[in-house]
Image (cartoon, grey):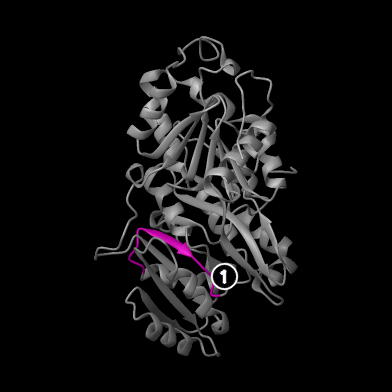
Amino acid sequence: MGVTVGPSGDFGEYRRLLASLTLYERLVGRRPGSVLQLGCGACRGIDVLRGMGLDAAGAESLPELLEGALEEHPYVVRAIRHRVPLAPASYDLVVSFGYLRRYGCHEMGPVVREHLRLARHLAVMQLPDTGAWASPSDGGGSRPRCVRPVEWWTSLARWVGAQSAFEEDGWLIAMPGEAGRPPRRRRAGGDPAVSIVIPCYNLGAYLAETLESVHRQTRDDWEAIVVNDGSTDDTAARVEEALRRHGDDRLRYVEQPNRGLPAARNAGIQSARGRYILPLDADDLLDPAFLEETVEVLEAFPELGIVYTHLQAFGSESWQAACPPWHPCRLLDQNRLPYASLYRREVWESVGGYDPAMREGYEDWEFWVAAAEAGWRATCVPRALFFYRRRPGSMLSHSMRHHTRLHDRIRSKHHRLAERCRQAGRPAAGR
């Protein structure tokens, strides 16, 4: 099946997205599971794609568009210092319509390489020398557009690492090659990059499945620390079984009297060797790409301390939550991050760890507010890489019954952040 997208410029974003999907199906042989549109923040096409059941996000790099309406849009990947905070090969399909026209010819190598870095299977770029972008300059005329023969574009794509590249009706279509991607990090002795801390209190029945999701990670420089918080079930036996099955020194076991979830997390982190920490409850799961996509963000962006993902609920309920952008002031009134978010060990050290007084719940919410108060920044990888088990009698159910009291404790403890937000004219939602 062919695709005809002409240069006349009378095609809307929706039709261009559909044409890109058709191209992908033709070349890859199936529908993409995830799509990233570069040069687009709150484009309506992103919502259309999500309505079709696709994991879709937009990434914007223009600084004047990174505030205001985009700030609270849930599907936007906010650029930081003009770099998109996404790990390599985050999306099956990466598309851009007119994005290339923002740059001069001398900048095209890095721009096309970024498309290839982010695309798992296919990158589709509308060329700037089509009729759709006939203006001789980039918007205000600060940069001349890069108009070159199609052979130049295909040669450029191959030069920056494409496995194959061709032009079709004003599009540059490139398939990423392994040469264009950073090598996957592998364990080479010494301390692990990530310490996954798994407190367990009478959840031994779920532990094997949780540990299996850890062992399936595509990045393997991790350690997992199971903290048995005074369980009365067979948690210890389940850990021994996992050790026998995997024969892996990356799995460690800590046992202590029952002190509650915050204290159990702190105990695991105190013995952790990784520079990054990932809390994970004993009944929840990780997508195989979780570490690969989140660790790359923290390594690429030293100004960030925390990286989180969308959440997929399973078990007694099934739904997906798209995490909004990091917003310290709104965080005071609503917990906007999954507890299972990757962060630098320095974040935990700077806030004094999880508050043991939050034993009834919301300890993760208090931790994120404390991190925001300490000045840490975060970003979201907009993919559902964390799987949260919903079951009757969970700790969250108990916490929600005492929501007002626990929330008041958080706001009272972090009144300095609330005051800073008030003085900055950025009150929390609903205030």
| Quadrant of the rendering where the C terminus is positioned | top right
- State the residue lying farthest toward the left: 189
* Residue annotated with mark 1: 284
The amino acid type, in three-letter code, at marker 1 is Asp
Q: Which residues are magenta?
A: 272-282
SS for dot 1: loop
Residue 110 point in image, percent of width and height: 38, 30
Looking at this rendering, what residue extends furthest in the front direction? Answer: 1
Q: Residue 44 lies in magenta, yes or no?
A: no
Residue at the spot x=45%, y=55% of the render? 343
Position above or below: 393 against 28: below
Residue occupying the point 32% across, 64% down: 192
Q: Nearer the viewer, residue 116 or 396?
A: 116
- In the rendered image, the quadrant that contains the N terminus is top right
Q: Residues within 10 Å of mark 1 (few under 14, many from 20)?
A: many
Task: State how many labels appear.
Answer: 1
Q: Magenta-highlighted stretch: main secondary structure? A: loop
Choose between 189 and 343: the one closer to the eye.
Answer: 189
Q: Quadrant of residue 281?
A: bottom right
